Image: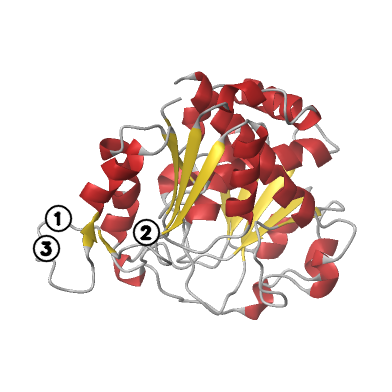
């Protein structure tokens, strides 16, 4: 595996899931693969779970780890071609990337959407420059449009906690005070479409995700109808994807607090489990009582980030 961005990159899901549970039973089984190998993790944006889980996964596999926070201690990087670099950016990404590649064997990149230029964000401009110029295998630690490590961990969590063979899984929009990217809901929808679940996506009108991520999911604008009989509720805010109105891309066009997941919402489900990628704004996305309930899976979900990342790094090491 030379790159990991979308669900297709992982190959057959049943094999990937079997590998995930094998690694969860023995996290150090493949430690020999990473001996004398180095992972470089590059962060253009803040991180808690992604940084910790990825570093732990690499260490479990015997790797050395270098962490570069581009916004703290590195030269400011220019990402655009053709600009006159007479501002505050001292180094161009096109020189920085191959230099980084000299010091490592694998590269993980975290770079969020700017939410001002949909075409630029959805072209995955920054990530694709790493793939093209680093000379190393590259995996996404969340990008402008996807977060595959999170979605893989979500699928592992659902598999562990499902009580029926084909559970009903609902991805629900919830209000937020800031404009957030669509990366997590995009990847969640993509991975659930590839899995054996009944996926329903619910959100206010105008918040439609890109069709390539919606896939075969059913879109339901009535949140109560969507929740009825659900086994898993995955709450996440996203800013307007600009699908129905490009001028709205990246904007907050709804702050409807009736979409906040509370006890009443969960009562519509089939004793549903609550999921969220974290960090979460309490009492905007979800109320205290729901996230603290026995049916909340946010901590096991976060723990599985170590497992999903271990599978991906293992696959990449095996391909070196």
Q: Is residue 164 left or right of residue 208?
A: right
Of labels 2 and 3, earlier in sequence is 3
Quarter in which the C terminus is drawn? top left
Query: In what element is the residue under mark 3?
Result: loop
Q: Nearer the viewer, residue 279 or 92?
A: 92
Query: Most extreme residue toward the front, as rendered?
Result: 36
Asked if 82 appears above or below 188 in the picture, the reply is below
Query: In what element is the residue under mark 2?
Result: loop
Where residue 281 sits: x, y (%)?
A: 66, 73
Which numbered dot is residue 112?
none
Q: Which circle, 2 or 3, is nearer the viewer?
A: 3
What residue would you read off at disc 1? Answer: 81
In the rendered image, is residue 61 in sight? yes
Asked if 190 appears above or below 283 in the picture, the reply is above
Q: Quadrant of residue 256?
A: bottom right
Disc 1 to disc 3: CB gap under 8 Å: yes
Query: In what element is the residue under mark 1?
Result: loop
Disc 1 to disc 2: CB gap under 8 Å: no
Which numbered dot is residue 83?
3
Which numbered dot is residue 243?
2
Where residue 153 sits: x, y (%)?
A: 66, 42
Asked if 254 appears above or below 194 in the picture, the reply is below
Classed neighbour count for the residue bearing mark 3: other residues with Cα under 10 Å, few (<14), some (14–19), many (≥20) = few
**Residue at 76% from the left image edge and 36% from the top image edge:** 159
Where residue 147 sits: x, y (%)?
A: 52, 48
């Amino acid at each position: 595996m030379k790159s990991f961005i979308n669900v297709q990159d992982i190959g057959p899901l049943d094999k990937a899931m079997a590998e995930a549970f094998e690694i969860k039973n023995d996290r150090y089984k493949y430690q020999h693969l990473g001996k004398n190998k180095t992972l470089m993790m590059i962060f253009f944006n803040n991180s808690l779970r992604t940084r910790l889980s990825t570093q732990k996964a690499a260490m479990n596999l015997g790797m050395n780890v270098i962490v570069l926070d581009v916004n703290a201690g590195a030269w400011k990087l220019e990402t655009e071609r053709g600009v006159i670099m007479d501002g505050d950016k001292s180094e161009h990404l096109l020189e920085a990337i191959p230099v980084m590649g000299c010091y490592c064997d694998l590269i993980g990149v975290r770079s969020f959407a700017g939410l001002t230029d949909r075409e630029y964000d959805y072209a995955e401009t920054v990530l694709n420059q790493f793939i093209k110029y680093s000379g190393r295998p590259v995996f996404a630690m969340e990008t402008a449009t996807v977060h595959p490590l999170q979605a893989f961990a979500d699928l592992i969590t659902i598999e562990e906690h499902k009580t029926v063979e084909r559970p009903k899984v609902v991805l629900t929009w919830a209000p937020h005070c800031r404009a957030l990217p669509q990366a997590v809901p995009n990847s969640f929808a993509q991975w659930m479409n590839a899995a054996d679940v009944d996926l329903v996506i619910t959100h206010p009108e105008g918040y439609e995700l890109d069709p390539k991520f919606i896939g075969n999911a059913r879109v339901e604008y009535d949140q109560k109808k969507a929740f009825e009989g659900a086994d898993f509720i995955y709450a996440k805010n996203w800013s307007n994807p600009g699908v129905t109105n490009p001028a709205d891309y990246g904007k907050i066009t709804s702050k409807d607090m009736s979409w906040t997941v509370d006890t009443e919402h969960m009562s519509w489900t089939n004793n549903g489990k609550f999921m969220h990628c974290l960090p979460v704004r309490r009492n905007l996305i979800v109320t205290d009582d729901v996230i603290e309930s026995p049916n909340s899976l946010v901590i096991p979900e976060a723990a599985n980030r170590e497992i999903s990342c271990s599978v991906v790094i293992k696959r990449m090491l095996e391909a070196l």
